[in-house]
Structures are given as structure tokens and as C-alpha cells.
Amino acid sequence: MAKTNLYSETDESDNFDKNELSEDSDNVLDQLTAVISKKVTRPNIFINVPERPGVTLLISPNITQQQIKAWQKKCWHGFKNWT
């Protein structure tokens, strides 16, 4: 079976540049704040469909805050009616 790369070739999650922090920051706290404030994203996943030649599924593992809140509401809605 051929090896398939599930992730896109450009690794977007590796946007961290050590040179940015070394000169611009005054102390460790500033460096930590800069790293934490960056947006975290994971690369998209591509899955080829064997039954359909030329068809590839694009799946994004990144979720938004709105999606998390909607899932929490759905979960609690079913749980509240359980009593």
C-alpha cells in the first residue's frame, strides 16, 4: 500500500520564530506572553477516497469558540432533561 501524507505540505503550526523573542523581549515574562498570545492552528488533513479516484476530503481539525459553546449547549440540554 502506498504511503499517503495526511497533512498538507506546509506546516502552519510551526510559525514560531526563536529570533523574534531573543532581541525584542526584555524578560522571560514578555517572551512567554508573546508565545501564549499567538493563535494555535493545526494543519488541514487530506484523505483520498479509494472508491472515487481524484476525490480528496479536506478536514480541518481547528474548531472555533462558537463551535465549542454550541457543543456544550447541546450536551447540557440532553443532560438537564435527564432528571
Image (cartoon, helix red, strand yellow):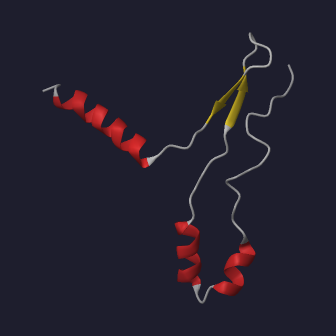
| Residue at 67 percent of width and 45 percent of height | 43
| Residue at 79 percent of width and 34 percent of height | 5
Which image quadrant for residue 25?
A: bottom right
Image quadrant containing the N terminus = top right
Residue 2 appears at what percent x and percent y?
A: 87, 23
Question: Eyeballing the image, is 52 above or below 74?
Answer: above
Image quadrant containing the C terminus = top left
Task: Determine whether, in the image, residue 4 is placed left or right of residue 57.
Answer: right
Residue 44 appears at what percent x and percent y?
A: 66, 40
Which image quadrant for residue 32?
A: bottom right
Residue 3 appears at what percent x and percent y?
A: 84, 28
Question: Eyeballing the image, is 3 above or below 66?
Answer: above
Residue at the extreme left: 83
Question: Eyeballing the image, is 13 above or below 23?
Answer: above
| Residue at 70 percent of width and 61 percent of height | 15
Q: Nearer the viewer, residue 5 or 70?
A: 70
Residue at the extreme front: 54
Task: Determine whether, in the image, residue 18 is placed left or right of residue 68.
Answer: right
Residue at the extreme bottom: 26
